[in-house]
Image (cartoon, rainbow, N blue to C red):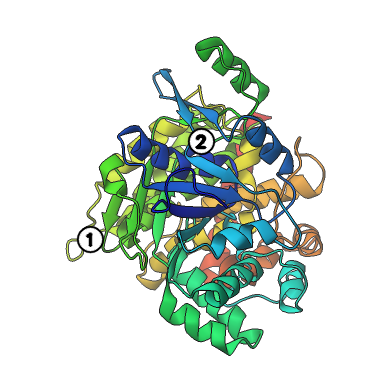
Amino acid sequence: MKNSGNSDTSIQLHLGLGSFHRAHQAMYMQNLHDIGETQWEIAAGNIRSDMQSVVEILKSQNNEYMLETVSPAGEHKYQLIRSIKHIVDWEKDMKGITEIAANENTKIISFTVTEAGYYLDGNFKLDDNYKDLQSDLAGNAPCTIYGTMTQLLRARMASHGEPVTLLNCDNVRSNGEKFKNALLEYIERIGDTDLLEWVKTHTSSPNSMVDRITPRPTADIIERVFAATGRRDEAALMGESFTQWVIEDNFIAGRPPWELVDVEMVEDVEPYEEAKIRVLNATHSCIAWAGTLRGYQYIHQGTNDPEVRQLAFDYVTNDVIPCLTSAESPSPIDLEKYRDTVLERFSNPNILDTNQRVVMDAYSKIPSFILPTIQDAIKTGRSIDSVAMLPALFLAFLVREQKGEIKFEYEDAMMSTENAQKIVSSDDIIHAFSNDKILFGDLAGNQTLRETLRKAYDRVNAFIEKTA
């Protein structure tokens, strides 16, 4: 690979060329380029073959595309993103990506593979129940982030051995730490002791928190971009005007000066990610489940429904905020203000973010986004009445999804159809649901959880009946 600049140009290799990366991390790099900070650039590719059509479109446009952002007030802005200087075609043997990873100028390997792409059990260990992970552990062509990263780092170690930062950009709590631990477990299990020791000493994996609502692109965006800019752009995408990136400043091989473009470089990401995961991500799911049950298609429709909005408001106010701040340990974030900002963002009618996109992967989201609040509240003897409404909403959604009553296809990489059928066909659906260890971990079978879910499920059914 040739750098577009000179031999001193540093490379951020990104795995996962989806909409979120292009609307978030690539935008921040473009913002640096726009102020003359051009010593870093992005190379990108995918570890799966299902986005090759997007790759082909981007390559036909010299890797450039327009990003449309829309504020809650309806203000549209357009930015040409050209910070991704090299795009790699998907190959089963990952040859192109491996060559870039082994390039001495590559200082950061970042990735977005979604919450479901980490295959972790309740103890954050690799879960062997997943076929893709089984395949990688058996030595087949890599199809998980662990098999892929192992191949990339093995090539880098053999080439020159220079250190590299592994930057997780997914909505996973303590994302860098959990990924690094899981990667080390993977390498240990395949028996590569040399690589194991090298990764321990030659990589860092900072935690990060990312935030920007980025709906799946539609044909409407292409037409709006053309009308506003005169550019016919088949790779155009849109996102909300709000954006945030908080990163633990732990880069073993250097980094771009992101602080110049409003990235928050901090010592500890935890307060920010806890607020984001519990207040924003869980609320997003709450509104998507409730909105779907009310017959809505878009997130803003549910948010602007007073009853749906109240469910979300009560969840954050009654159960999340008491978990995240106290007189003894105050949060650095104004959580009430953050709650209100989140609800304002979700009410934006210009985003047209679909419930279908947000409801997906509940079997990953409930344990990560919602269960910690339940655990904290039970541990300290507080009520879980408000937070219990969220899994109860999902259960009502699941019942209807399994009966074929949901109007769209539900996607959930972690959910077993057999297990879902077992739950919804049970004589005691709440007992079966609350015993699900994937969803509730060590609280599976907990009496307080079960009885509170029972009451919450009754409230959800009453909520649905109002719609009929």
Q: Nearer the viewer, mark 2 or mark 1?
A: 1
> Which mark sits nearer the N-terminus, 2 or 1?
2
Q: In the rendered view, would you say 228 is above or below 346?
A: above
What residue did someone put label 1 on? 326
Of residues 438 and 9, the one drawn nearer to the viewer in this rendering: 9
- Give the position of the C terminus as an image quadrant: top right
Taking the image as shown, residue 69 lies to the left or right of residue 2, namely left
Q: Residue furthest left?
A: 327
Q: Residue furthest front?
A: 7
Taking the image as shown, residue 350 lies to the left or right of residue 344, namely right
Amino acid, disc 2: Val
**Spot occupied by residue 241 in the image (x, y as percentages of width and height):** 40, 30
Residue 325 is at least partly visible in this image: yes
Q: In the rendered view, would you say 303 is above or below 336?
A: above
Q: Residue at x 45, y 51 (%)?
A: 386
Q: Secondary structure at mark 1?
A: loop
Disc assigned to residue 220: none
What residue did someone put label 2 on? 308
Q: How many marks?
A: 2
**Spot occupied by residue 142 in the image (x, y as percentages of width and height):** 71, 67
Q: Secondary structure at mark 2?
A: helix
Of residues 13 and 263, the one drawn nearer to the viewer in this rendering: 13
Which image quadrant for residue 254? bottom left
Residue 446 is at least partly visible in this image: no
**Spot occupied by residue 415 in the image (x, y as percentages of width and height):** 71, 60
Amino acid, disc 1: Ser
